[in-house]
Amino acid sequence: MLMEIVLSQVQAWNSGNLDRLLPHYADTVQVYAMPDNTVIFDGKEKLKAHLKPEFDNGKVVQVKVLEKLEYPPYVVLVEEKSAPEGTRRAVVTYLIEDGKITKMWIAKVECKDAINK
């Protein structure tokens, strides 16, 4: 169940439809950058405001899931985004509560250090 929520969120991201993406998140979602746990976004409205320009101009970079792990109430994905400026990978941990993503921790990794395909 938890994995399906997160993978549905990835599919919604890849569809380029912000209205399809946002229902996956709790109103109080918090997004953190690792390793120092810096808050990137606090609340769905701030997340929406940040993502809206990217989604409105049709420049959403597709996410490919390289690895996945479910350990309730957490889901961990190794995600890859390929864009003209280069490939980026991240390990993203999602906390799922009441069917919504309530917290995310994003750890960017260098491609040379990432898990081999």
Image (spheres, rainbow, N blue to C red):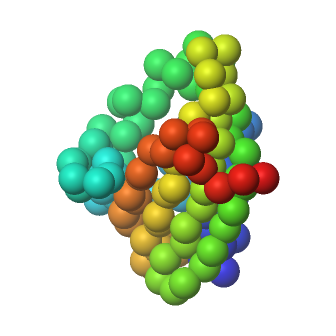
- Position of residue 87 measured from the top left corner of the image (x, y, whole percent): 63, 30
Q: In this view, which residue lies farthest toward the front?
A: 112
Q: Nearer the viewer, residue 115 or 61?
A: 115
Q: Is residue 98 above or below residue 64?
A: below
Does the image show residue 67? Answer: yes
Q: Nearer the viewer, residue 117 or 42?
A: 117
Q: Is residue 95 above or below residue 22?
A: below
Residue drawn at x 49%, y 45% is 109
Residue drawn at x 66%, y 80% is 1
Q: Nearer the viewer, residue 39 or 78?
A: 78
Residue drawn at x 57%, y 34% is 88
- Position of residue 18 measured from the top left corner of the image (x, y, whole percent): 57, 36
Q: Is residue 42 left or right of residue 61?
A: left
- Position of residue 13 measured from the top left corner of the image (x, y, whole percent): 64, 41
Query: How many numbered discs?
Result: 0
Residue drawn at x 45%, y 44% is 108
Q: Is residue 89 above or below residue 31?
A: above
